[in-house]
Image: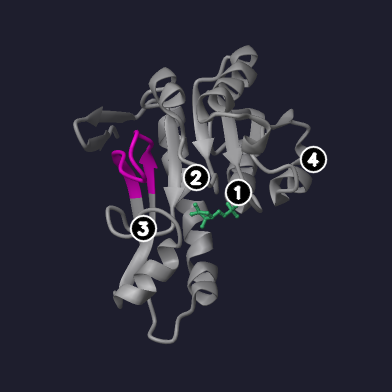
Amino acid sequence: KRLALFASGRGSNGEALYKAMQEGYINGEFVVIITDHGDAGIVERSKPWNIPLIVIERSDYDSKASFEKAQLDALEPYKIDGIVLAGYMRIVGAQLIEYYEHRILNIHPALLPSFPGLHGHQQAIDAGVKVTGCTVHFVDAGMDTGPIIMQNTVPLLPEDTEDTLSDRLLPIEHKTYKEALRLFCEDKLTIKGRVVYIED
Ligand code: GRF
């Protein structure tokens, strides 16, 4: 599949997925990268990949709708089959969701539907849960509410901080996202209501 990568930050998930594509584990390719931060880590990190990267910053547009239209227009020539959000820190607009319905994936650093939104790690720590994890899901109009594709867990230790927990969780995120995207690229995911069925 032809995929767009959306990232706002350091881009470690994007890189794990890129490598899995290079190794042939995922039958897909990133054909364009879109970031909403010109100074995001993903910009430097992805340079050796030679994939077109487009910076579309919210502050350059006077409305959410025109910002979103710019994203849609930027994607159009690439004829993508799906969008991979990896550390993309904005709510995806309604037009994009409609246009790419059931073709946008996201990773969240908690076990949804618990702890959606920002600071998923800290929310889990504050709640005192003993197990947390990550969730790869399809994106719908809500905040981290779309149908769940895959989850994996890690223990949450009493002395954990946001940093220690995110260090423990990050490799699990990479593994989970690789598996989920592999299945998506092989058309093995079917959504029925809130449930994603995996064909074997
Ligand atoms: C990850 O923890 C991801 O779950 C969250 O943002 C972080 C992105 O990390 N949505 P990276 O940019 O992929 O390194």
Q: Residue at x 21, y 37 (%)?
A: 194
Report the amino acid beneath label 3. Asn
Image: 53 above or below 48 = above
Q: CA–CA distance between discs 2 and 4?
A: 21 Å
Secondary structure category for the residue under label 2: helix
Q: Is residue 166 left or right of residue 196?
A: right
- First in sequence: mark 1 vs mark 2: 1
Q: Residue at x 34, y 47 (%)?
A: 150
Q: Which residue is mark 3?
A: 152
Q: Which residue is mark 1?
A: 16
Report the amino acid beneath label 2. Lys
Secondary structure category for the residue under label 3: strand
Q: Mark 3: few, some, or many residues within 10 Å (few <14, many ≥20)?
A: some
Q: Residue at x 47, y 46 (%)?
A: 177
Q: Is residue 56 left or right of residue 189?
A: right
Residue 115, position in %: x, y?
A: 33, 60
Q: CA–CA distance between discs 4 and 1?
A: 15 Å
Q: CA–CA distance between discs 1 and 3?
A: 16 Å
Q: Mark 4: few, some, or many residues within 10 Å (few <14, many ≥20)?
A: few
Q: Which residue is mark 2?
A: 178
Q: Which of pointers 4 and 1 indicates the residue nearer the eye?
A: 4
Q: Tell me the quarter of the image containing the C terminus.
A: top left
Does the beta carbon at disc 1 come under 8 Å from ligand 1?
A: yes
Q: CA–CA distance between discs 2 and 3?
A: 12 Å
- First in sequence: mark 2 vs mark 3: 3
- First in sequence: mark 3 vs mark 4: 4
Magenta span covers which residues? 136-150
